[in-house]
Image (cartoon, grey):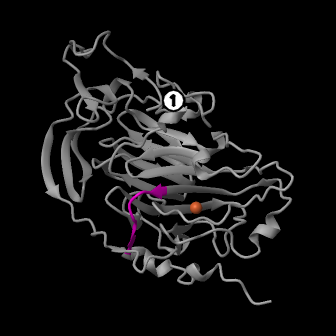
Amino acid sequence: MPSYVRSGSLPHKRHIQFRRPDGGLYAEELFSTKGFESVYSLLYHAAPPTATLDVRAWDRPKIVLSPNDPVRNRHFLTAKLPSGGDAIASRVPVLGNADILISVAEFSEPMDYFYREVGGDELLFVHHGEGTLETPFGELAYRANDYLVIPSGTTYRVHPSSLTRMLVHASSGAVKIPRRYRNEFGQLEEHAPYYERDFRVPTFKPPVERRGEHEIRVTNGGRDAIYIVQNHPCDVVGWDGYCYPYAFNLEEFAPITGKLHQPPPAHATFEAPGAAFCAFVPRMFDYHPQAVPVPYNHSSVDCDEVLYYVSGNFMSRRGVEEGSITLHAAGAPHGPQPGAVESSLGKTSTDEMAVMVDTFAPLMVAEAVEPCEDRNYYRSWIQESP
Ligand SMILES: [Fe+2]
């Protein structure tokens, strides 16, 4: 919710009569968060979104998570996982805890149903591919290196126009812009690495007024259902407010660099309950004449660090490839692999792109991802004898 947006046709005041050309009333919907106390939008539907014809069980495959025990650093080559299906069916869970579930999805088929995650906001990172998110707020086109923020409760479907790979974060709460980037009025401050103009909002589309049997697959905290509704979800003639899906492309991210190595919080993008997100994008390295460009050895004692490797040459990591996910577990030291410090000296810039999420509760590992694990990763820092 970067700022207030209005789109389409609206009555001049909220909660008053708003009539269709045929004299009937539009159906106003308040789309609110934290009850009535946080951001919200008002949507005007051609027909009520409440007309539910049937509710059926949705037997999704259960997600099996196991503790990272014995606690250690892990590496999953997720590009080796099977792909196919649509944006939801293709999701393969990787890591999760009570705050967040991290999955990967590679797909080329459009969804012939709508999806609605109600347990919290979703943050999708588009690794590659192009397509469209169809929502009641309008259409949001996506491309490589986009973050898509989808508020909890948003009904949507994904129409890929090319093979698309996404990293999916399903949060248990709101995905927000860090508070320290905002001034007292909510505007992004001058020191923030992005600006309101960098965020893309849905393009308004004419309402789809189609009565019939429309399928919406709903998930909420492990409870799954298939709703059959009478009116097309994208029959909105206008909406306004602060709560809507939006996109942000990492090419617009203006990384903060310095004389010496900048720690991950300098690269923060979003935050959510129990999770902090960062992006490492192509940038100039530190300009102290004796600076060490790669990160120092590091043991984060109170969070698990998850890196997803997007593109470029990952200078400080041996054995990772595009699509790799590393889990650096709380208390297990990590850092540049042998030789990486020396080979980084004198370099002035990096072309690497990676996205990170730190979680403040331990992550568990999904059974589905174990076949693509590099099981020797935790030994990758061993120095060979001369
Ligand atoms: Fe770290």
Magenta stretch contains residue 362: yes
Mark 1 C-beta closer than 8 Å to ligand 1 = no
Q: Would you name the residue on which mark 1 appears? A: 182
User: How far across and how far down the image is residue 318, in percent?
Assistant: 68, 74
Spot occupied by residue 75 in the image (x, y as percentages of width and height)? 54, 74
Identified at 54% across, 59% down, the residue is 163
Q: Nearer the viewer, residue 273 or 198?
A: 273
- Quadrant location, ligand no. 1: bottom right
Task: In the rendered view, tell whether residue 280 sits above or below residue 339.
Answer: above
User: What range is drawn magenta here?
Assistant: 358-366
Query: On the rendered structure, is 160 left or right of 340?
Result: left
User: Outermost residue, top direction?
Assistant: 12
Horizontally, is 50 left or right of 343 in the view? left
Q: Is residue 160 visible?
A: no
Q: Residue at x 71, y 60 (%)?
A: 312
Q: Nearer the viewer, residue 256 or 110?
A: 256
The image quarter in which residue 384 lies: bottom right
Q: Amino acid at mark 1?
A: Arg
**Callout 1: SS:** loop
Q: Relative to residue 162, is residue 186 depicted above or below?
A: above
Residue 153 spot, x, y in % from top left: 29, 42
Name the quadrant of the N terminus: top left
Q: Nearer the viewer, residue 362 or 349?
A: 362
Query: Is residue 61 shown above or below 377?
Result: above
